[in-house]
Image (cartoon, rainbow, N blue to C red):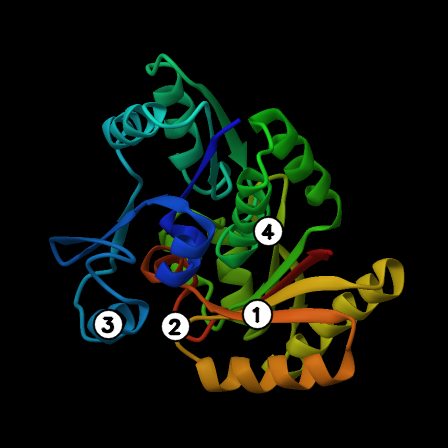
Amino acid sequence: MKTAIITDSTAYLTLEERKAYNVHMIPLSVNIEGTFYDEEIDITASEFYDRVRGAKEFPKTTQPSIGKFVELFETLAKDYDEIVTIHLSSGISGTFQGAVQASDMVEGTKIYAFDSEVAAYLQGMYVKEAAKLALEGASGEQIMAHLNEMKHTMNEYIIVDDLQHLQRGGRLSAAAALIGGLLQVKPILTFQDKVIVPFEKIRTRKKALRRVEEQLASSVETYGALQATVIHANCEEEAREWMDSLAAAYPTVDFTLSYFGPVVGTHLGEGAIAMGWMKK
């Protein structure tokens, strides 16, 4: 059984990781003052934050066209028996639904679409697990069963500096953003039922980081060994320091440092930091 693994660019797997795991990637795009860039191809994360800082207009993001999915599916169908395509949460993007619609247009191969219900490197963790199984000869059905099992222990918490980015992009209600701004808090956000929602409102960034660590500690107590990631929006030094301190405090947790690229960074804003994990 040959099973192809596809994801979109918001998994933020490096080119080296995609090559090592034989993962195919379809990009989302960001529009900066009228110019479209395919993230992970035309523009890097650091270039994006530099350009947006001086831009007069708020950038916009665009999901892949159904035609791009169809083209990739048809190409892979020539060499693979099945395809598993893994995408960011359907509650914040139409990318997953686009993949589903495209799968109905392609004949000759079985296509499974997986809604990660999260974004960024947590999505990437699903992709890497799927890719490992595919390389071992697992079927699409077996891979999907494993991915759905992984969801039970998945957690992601995001700390943002400014809720206006999420509100402008339609990923958070205006009321929630207004309250956060008025109270001058550092909100902790999480995914619930596929959408981003407030988890807790904390007064300082330092306390917010500590609160997320408490959630991690609870999961370590419950599950023991975890795989985790610290993700940053152009604040790598802070993220690395936090990750290193956590790695020293929780030896049963394997950490990976990752980043929010242009598309997710558009909605979270520069300075956002997050941590997520799942049971090993």
User: Mark 2: few, some, or many residues within 10 Å (few <14, many ≥20)?
Assistant: many
Residue at position x 28%, y 56% in the image: 39
Pointer 2: what residue? 270
Q: Identify which residue, 90 or 241, lies in the foreground.
A: 241
Q: In the rendering, at what x and y percent does residue 242 appear?
A: 61, 83
Q: Is residue 34 left or right of residue 53?
A: left
**Mark 2 residue type:** Glu
Label 4 or label 3, whichever comes before in sequence order: 3
Identity of the residue furthest to the right in this view: 221
Q: Secondary structure at mark 1?
A: strand
Pointer 4: what residue? 197
The circle drawn on residue 28 is none
The circle drawn on residue 256 is 1
Residue at position x 44%, y 59% in the image: 17
Label 4 or label 2, whichever comes before in sequence order: 4
Q: Identify which residue, 178 or 23, lies in the foreground.
A: 23
In the rendered view, would you say 128 is above or below 271? Answer: above
Q: Secondary structure at mark 3?
A: helix
* Mark 3–mark 1 CB contact (< 8 Å): no
In the rendered view, would you say 44 is above or below 152? Answer: below
The answer to whether residue 167 is seen in the rendering is: no
